């Protein structure tokens, strides 16, 4: 069976950047499963897995435009320190959340100074090439419930 729209693909992956730095891996855990064609994984990886079958092994290189997008310097801005609770330990690298009319937003703290906190709204992997070492373990038909919900249900669980 091939990885095409509406199939559940189970795989192991190891994700590194262009310097070989390990960013994530499913090794040592349960295989990662997703519903192919439903946008559950980055577009470039899904394209690289299109038509693959159990036993497929490859390196899939995903450029930023097909991953988490290009880095946008306009998405970095400073907010007054007073917008955070007094005494809160704000550190560079931590993630904080805010809210607007569209819902909850995540920001990475890029700098802290006496007057404010510089926040970066870019995804932490924006602007990075992603290198996936993949091994497809299984491709199966999705259940009707998985198709209607648009994602995989682990071990027969429906939520």
Image (tube, rainbow, N blue to C red):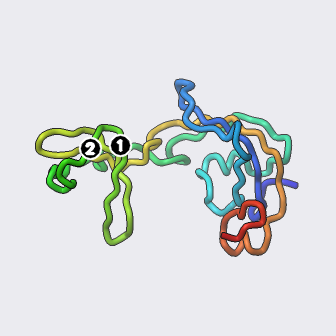
**Is residue 137 shown above or below 17?**
below
Q: Which residue is mark 1?
A: 94
Q: Is residue 38 depicted above or below 2 in this figure? A: below
Dividing the picture into quarters, in which one does residue 127 lie?
top left
Q: Is residue 85 left or right of residue 157?
A: left
**Residue 122 position within the rendered picture, expressed as x and y whole percent measured from the top left:** 38, 48
Residue 24, horizontal then vertical, whole percent: 58, 38
Q: Are marks 1 and 2 in contact (CB under 8 Å)?
A: yes
The residue drawn where x is 35% and y is 39% is 93
* Rendered residue at 69%/35% (across/down): 133
Most extreme residue toward the top is 19
Which dot marks residue 90?
A: 2
Q: Label 1 to label 2, Cα distance in Å?
A: 7 Å
**Percent from the top left, x then y, of residue 117?**
21, 45
Query: What is the secondary structure assignment of the residue under circle 2?
Result: loop
Q: Which residue sits furthest left?
A: 115
């Amino acid at each position: 069976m091939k990885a095409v729209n509406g199939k559940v693909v189970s795989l192991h992956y190891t994700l590194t950047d262009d310097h070989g730095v390990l960013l994530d891996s499913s090794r040592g855990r349960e295989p990662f499963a997703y519903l192919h064609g439903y946008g559950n994984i980055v577009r470039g990886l899904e394209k690289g897995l299109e038509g693959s079958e159990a036993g497929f092994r490859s390196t899939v290189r995903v450029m930023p435009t097909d991953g988490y997008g290009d880095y946008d310097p306009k998405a970095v801005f400073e907010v007054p320190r007073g917008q955070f609770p007094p005494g809160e330990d704000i550190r560079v690298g931590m993630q904080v959340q805010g809210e607007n009319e569209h819902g909850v937003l995540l920001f990475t703290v890029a700098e802290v100074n006496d007057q404010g906190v510089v926040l970066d709204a870019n995804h932490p992997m924006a602007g990075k090439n992603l290198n996936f070492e993949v091994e497809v373990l299984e491709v199966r038909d999705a259940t009707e419930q998985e198709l209607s919900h648009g994602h995989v249900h682990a071990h027969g669980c429906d939520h």
